[in-house]
Amino acid sequence: MELSKTFVDFAQLGADWVLWLLIALSVFSVGVMVDRFLWFRGRDADTQAFLTEMRGAYERDELDHLTKKYKDDASIPVQVALRGLAERKGGPAAVAEAMHGERARWRRAGDKNLIILGTLGNNVPFVGLFGTVLGVMNAFLLLSSKSSQAEKETLDTIAEALSATAFGLMVAIPAVVAFNYFSRKLKVVMSGADECAHHVLALVHGTEHAGASPKPLGKPEETK
């Protein structure tokens, strides 16, 4: 009973502090969205055009020129391919491991802060609902006072309480949309990186097989 009374006293604080908390969370959410938008800008590439250029440079032995041209490129598929080409002298196994490590590094960087958007999208509505519950409890307490202004204050308090839920949804919906968008964007970019990695491995394997072509057989010895 004492615990219930303590919570009722806490409810008299109203939903104002919850609204301020939701405003802070919305600013934080927008900040993460802007950060991810700037990070993903330029991370994708026209993989077909790059692969055509890479194949030509590989065949003409002009990979150094290709590396200098794209070394500062922000595209993840390009950087994964260049990392593999840099290890081509070590053979296909070294190339594959180098590209795997490079891909993992970019994947980790792309996932940064996305969990924040997912968490906000899933939990902020409950924060708003909590504010609504506190506001409704406070409204009933006002109504029990039976003063001349009790009815008007009660209606105002209920409206304020419901606004907490509405504001929570306003914060959560953009966070969910942004989380889904950036997750999909990362998946597409990493798919392009996989495509480039497979083409690099194909070139390295082709060169290795060409260098290991069997020697022509000599003439069989004549039987005496």
Image (cartoon, helix red, strand yellow):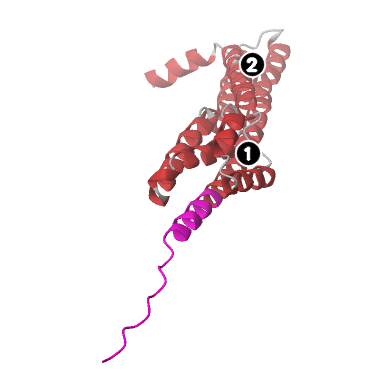
Where is residue 61 shown, x and y percent of the image?
56, 43
Q: CA distance from mark 1 to mark 2?
A: 52 Å
**Could you tell me the amino acid type at mark 2?**
Leu
**Could you tell me the amino acid type at mark 1?**
Lys
Residue 185's label in the rendered image is 1
In this view, which residue lies farthest toward the front?
A: 224
Q: Between label 1 and label 2, give the one nearer the viewer.
A: 1
Under tag 2, what secondary structure?
helix
In this view, which residue lies farthest toward the top?
A: 148
Q: Residues within 10 Å of mark 1 (few under 14, many from 20)?
A: some
Q: Residues within 10 Å of mark 2 (few under 14, many from 20)?
A: some
Q: Residue at x 54, y 12 (%)?
A: 12
Magenta stretch in the rendered image? 199-224
**Is 207 a magenta residue?**
yes
Pick the front one: 104 or 203: 203
The quarter in which the N terminus is drawn is: top left
Where is residue 41 shown, x and y percent of the image?
66, 28
In this view, which residue lies farthest toward the left?
A: 224
Q: Earlier in the sequence, mark 1 or mark 2?
A: 2
The image quadrant that residue 71 belongs to is top right
Q: Does residue 176 lie above or below 156 as drawn?
A: below
**Is 92 a magenta residue?**
no
The image quadrant that residue 25 belongs to is top right
Where is residue 10 shown, x and y percent of the image?
49, 14
Q: Residue at x 73, y 13 (%)?
A: 152
* Horizontal side, residue 218 vs residue 170: left or right: left
Evaluate whether residue 74 shows in this view.
no
Residue 143's label in the rendered image is 2
Evaluate whether residue 127 shows in this view.
yes
